[in-house]
Image (spheres, helix red, strand yellow):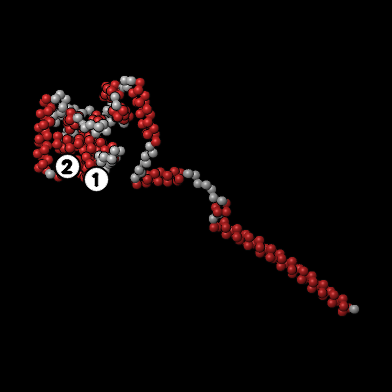
Amino acid sequence: MQTSSLRRQVKNMVNNFTEAEIKVREATSNDPWGPPCSLMAEIADLTFNAVAFTEVLGMVWKRLNDSGKNWRHVYKAMTLLDYLIKTGSERVIQECRENIYTIQTLRDFQHMDRDGVDQGAHVREKAKNLVALLKDEEKLKKERSQAMKTKTRMAGSVSGLGSGSHPPPYPGRRTSQAAGVHGDEHDMEQARPTTSGEEELQLQLALAMSREESEKPPSTVDIDEQTQLQMAMTLSKKETKKPVQPAPAALDMDEDTQLKMALSLSKEVHQQEQLSRQGDESVLKKALEDSTREMETKGGV
């Protein structure tokens, strides 16, 4: 078993890819050979199923947006998409026309390998031809008719090749335990290592993928305006339920109390002033009396 194939099987199990997604990943792998016609025929049949259609096209668009070093992903995805346009559901054509900008951008695809070979040229040529086909309705109908006849003829002579007229039932993503038992056993059997070298390699791949997942930054949670408003109202309610702390005594007095205190202080000051004046008058009176007595004493002499 090759390293790339083993890695795909481990990823398929870890990411819980569906049957349709696994088939697309296999058809658009980095292996140095083209996708088998039998596999592309199976994928074309799956596009007639509403659930599988979404999964197939979703994975195809993902492959088309891959980086330059994975140019085989992009080129094989273009090859598969060309096949699906000609032999798959007509919804594929509609989907491609709605997303034709994605295909058009690939006309500028660039990638030079380590030997200096421009591998992007294959992708650019494929994108150019595919865009032209999508824009030419008559040519598309003609090529689609011929491709469907060829596919049907081959389906009659090759076992397992889809015909497009009666697509097989599609189980979709396994959601129940009962539906997943036999499928999981099959996947485990396919991925089971046959030698100690494969077992060690499988373990290393699993550990590497685990590290990749753990190093991913946590996704940010988008809170809409309505949710923010609800959170603010909740916090406001909590604040209103908190016991009110008593204010300092000086700040708690009302206006009447403050006025009474001011009047009381004013009375005390007034009384002190009166006492002071009384004391001054007593001293003055005493001084006058002393002066009178002194004058009387002098007159008597």
Residue 108 is marked as 1
Quadrant assignment for the C terminus: bottom right
Residue 178 percent coordinates (x, y): 27, 23
Circle 2/circle 1 CB separation < 8 Å: no
* Foreground pick, 6 / 273: 6
210 over 126 or under it: above or below: above
Residue 101 percent coordinates (x, y): 22, 45
Residue 129 is marked as 2
Q: Along the horizontal axis of the image, is 132 left or right of 73?
A: left
What amino acid type is highlighted by mark number 2? Answer: Asn
Q: Is residue 225 visible?
A: yes
Residue beneath the point at 31% across and 28% down: 3
3 over 240 or under it: above or below: above
* Foreground pick, 65 / 116: 116
Q: How many marks?
A: 2
What amino acid type is highlighted by mark number 1? Answer: Asp
Q: Quadrant of residue 214?
A: top left
198 over 93 or under it: above or below: above
The mark that comes first in sequence, 2 or 1, is 1
230 over 27 or under it: above or below: below
Residue 162 percent coordinates (x, y): 15, 28
Q: Quadrant of residue 107?
A: top left
Residue 37 percent coordinates (x, y): 17, 30
Q: Along the horizontal axis of the image, is 71 left or right of 86?
A: right
Q: CA distance from mark 2 to mark 1?
A: 13 Å
* Foreground pick, 184 / 267: 184
Task: Mark 1: give few (<14), some (14-19) or many (20+) Cα within 10 Å.
Answer: some
Q: Along the horizontal axis of the image, is 75 left or right of 229?
A: left
Residue beneath the point at 46% across and 44% down: 241
Task: Mark 2: give few (<14), some (14-19) or many (20+) Cα within 10 Å.
Answer: few
Q: Is residue 99 visible?
A: no
Residue beneath the point at 84% across and 77% down: 295
